[in-house]
Amino acid sequence: MSYALNNAQNHPTPLKDFYTGLEEYVDEVCVSAYNLCGAAYNKNRPLRDSLTTWYNQVSTFTGPNMPLCISEMSSTGTCPGKDEWITDTWKDLATRFTRISTVNWLLQNKSYNGTPRDWDLNKPSDVTAFVDGFKDFKQITRPRKLLEAGN
């Protein structure tokens, strides 16, 4: 089950209404999360600013054992600081959004509303931020994984 992020922000039909009764059929609940700087707003928006409401609401009604995921996410490089956004996102995934078990990064340049967007890691600083951020993510989450495994 995948669901659009903005409905978790008190729109007419809350996600919980779609989920009720499907618990035995759903393996994980997912959301897309994009930093649309230059397309929808003029300043980079940290993942925590766009994901926290969804995460808290979904965590409440799915219970502690339902995996959550980000079905697709990325950031444009239209605004300065894409590398910082990537670094901050890895940190937030490791420390704030600990129930998210799957993340699919969109690493492909393509258009959004007819305007080309650089979703891929096009600059060396983007690549460095992605690689170093992932290494830090693994380091931060390693003790948690060991505890979950019973070691």
Image (tube, rainbow, N blue to C red):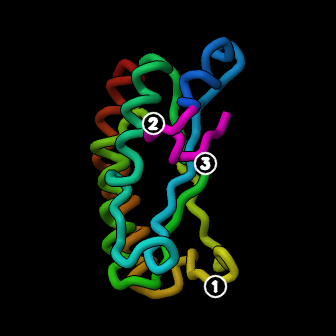
N-terminal of the pair, mark 1 or mark 2, is 2
Front residue of 73 and 56: 56
* Image quarter (top left, top right, bottom left or bottom right) of the C terminus: top left
Q: Residues within 10 Å of mark 1 (few under 14, many from 20)?
A: few
Amino acid bearing label 2: Asn
Where is residue 141? Give x, y as percent.
33, 42
Q: Secondary structure at mark 2?
A: loop
**Residue pointed to by mark 3:** 71
In space, the residues marked 3 and 2 are separated at their CA atoms by 21 Å
**Residue pointed to by mark 2:** 10
Residue contact between numbered discs 1 and 3, judged by CB atoms under 8 Å: no
Q: Secondary structure at mark 3?
A: strand
* Image quarter (top left, top right, bottom left or bottom right) of the N terminus: top right
In space, the residues marked 1 and 2 are separated at their CA atoms by 31 Å
Q: Quadrant of residue 117?
A: bottom right
Closer to the eye: label 1 or 3? 1
Which residue is pictured at 33% across the width and 51% down the height? 48
Span of residues in magenta: 1-12
Compared with residue 138, is residue 119 higher up or lower down, i.e. above or below?
below
